[in-house]
Amino acid sequence: PALADLQAQATAAPEHHDAFWMPFTANRQFKKSPRLLASAEGMYYRSTDGREILDGTAGLWCVNAGHGHPHIVQAIQKQAATLDYAPTFQMGHPLPFVLAERLAKLAPDPLKHVFYTNSGSESVDTALKIALAYHRVRGEGQRTRLIGREKGYHGVGFGGISVGGMVNNRKFFGPMLPGVDHLPHTLDIARNGFSRGLPAHGAELANELERLVALHDASTIAAVIIEPVSGSAGVVLPPEGYLRRIREICDKHGILLIFDEVITGFGRVGEAFAAQRFGVVPDLITTAKGLSNGAVPMGAVFATSAIHDAFMHGPEGAIELFHGYTYSGHPLACAAALATLDVYEGEGLFQRAIELGPYWEQAIHALKDLPNVVDIRNFGLVGAVELAARPEGAGLRGYEVFNRAFFEQNLMVRCTGDVIALSPPLILNKEHIDRIFDRLAATIRATA
Ligand code: PLP
């Protein structure tokens, strides 16, 4: 059947909605009043009922180059017709090599090696496994402890939820990985509320890592994993100086530092990576999302030469790392990523968050006096408006704003609890910014 017929079927007949068990969704609520997208171009989605929806979230933080970019579309189409699939276990095809070289040039020195995955969750599990194995191949196999943070989101694999710090993502799933500890989060509205850009207070929270070292001993700790800017927990920013301090403590104790850049990678906060924007270089970087503009699933882990080279000492015929995915370096994903990098470079998109940051900041902070707004946070092209919870329960007001924005204002935002999060495609201009915040302001007023 034609695509239009399938879309009509899905739109018109709610009985067709039952089979799809939707991820991270209130299934029963959604299926009573579905929010369905049919197509997309540039800054806009089109809903199945024919409305143009302004994309305030780049899909799920991934469509940094905007929707349906012809260069990316054509690259995927051409690749599908040329080489649909080729394994990368003891075999290869040219694209992942070409792509890895280009990615290595973008990454900060000395993160010059790339391991491919298919998602952010897989990138996180891969980075944690590389960290553990790295210590082991160097003869420090007792370094098995992993340190995450409260409010951290590192995807949904068992590794990611173990180091993650969002309670609902953890509490249903048993004991998870043993030997994990958590640093405190850095959200402090009492001291930092309505900060513009990075909050001034809280760098001292990095010293909590020294406390964990004193408790467990550095010789048991493999790695610390941190989102430089967290998205999923409602946009939590690093206080000025915090990341640098974490790096210093890791260096002092031989602990690897992993930056989870699944949302910050590929221009979200300016530069290719947040590591470069903040001037703090980790040992491993996890990425996904913007890597392939969300067009074909793909993730990648960047590792320093020191980590990579530590694995290269055994017999030449021995597999160095017993890890990988059937679709690591998938031809379609590589083609999408190569074309995406062309667009990022050709259109200067890694600079957009720096160029537009001040305008974005001004526009989001203009929402300060709207009803129920308890905090506003921004950095690069990331923003969050935190609303007071309704007395009847946490998250109800946030959900209502999200739902009304979609149906009444033709605006797509994200809500996590009562935080409205924004992360538009990097191709946006000032008019789009005005439109996003006019529509969001109208929605927040209507939801009072
Ligand atoms: N890590 C971070 C920081 C993320 O924000 C996300 C997704 O939002 C993930 C990991 C998981 O990515 P995926 O959903 O592709 O597995």
Image (cartoon, helix red, strand yellow):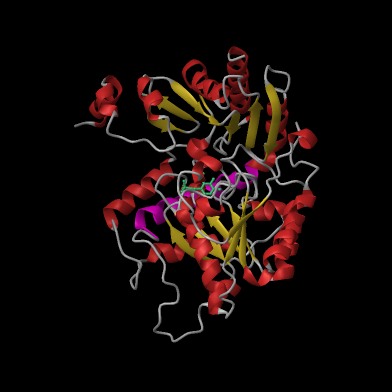
Position of residue 297 in the picture relative to residue 9 (left or right)? right
Q: Main secondary structure of the magenta part?
A: helix
Residue 192 spot, x, y in % from top left: 77, 36
Q: Residue at x 40, y 38 (%)?
A: 23
Residue 29 spot, x, y in % from top left: 40, 24
Position of 396 relative to 272 (above/below): above
Quarter of image, res 36: top left
Position of 100 relative to 401 (above/below): below
| Camera-side residue of 99 and 304 | 304
The stretch of residues the image draws in magenta is 329-352
**Does any portion of residue 102 appear in the rendered image?**
no
Residue 211 within the segment the image draws in magenta: no
Residue 60 spot, x, y in % from top left: 49, 38
Position of 433 relative to 126 (above/below): above
Residue 391 spot, x, y in % from top left: 61, 19
Position of 25 relative to 113 (above/below): above
Q: Return the residue found at the far bottom.
A: 315
Which quadrant of the figure contains the N terminus?
top left
Which quadrant of the figure contains the C terminus?
top right
Position of residue 327 in the picture relative to residue 138 (left or right)? left
**Does any portion of residue 209 appear in the rendered image?**
yes
Q: Residue at x 43, y 58 (%)?
A: 117
Count of numbered circles in the view: 0
Position of residue 106 in the picture relative to residue 206 (left or right)? left
Residue 335 within the segment the image draws in magenta: yes
| Camera-side residue of 4 and 18 | 18
Q: Return the residue found at the far left.
A: 1
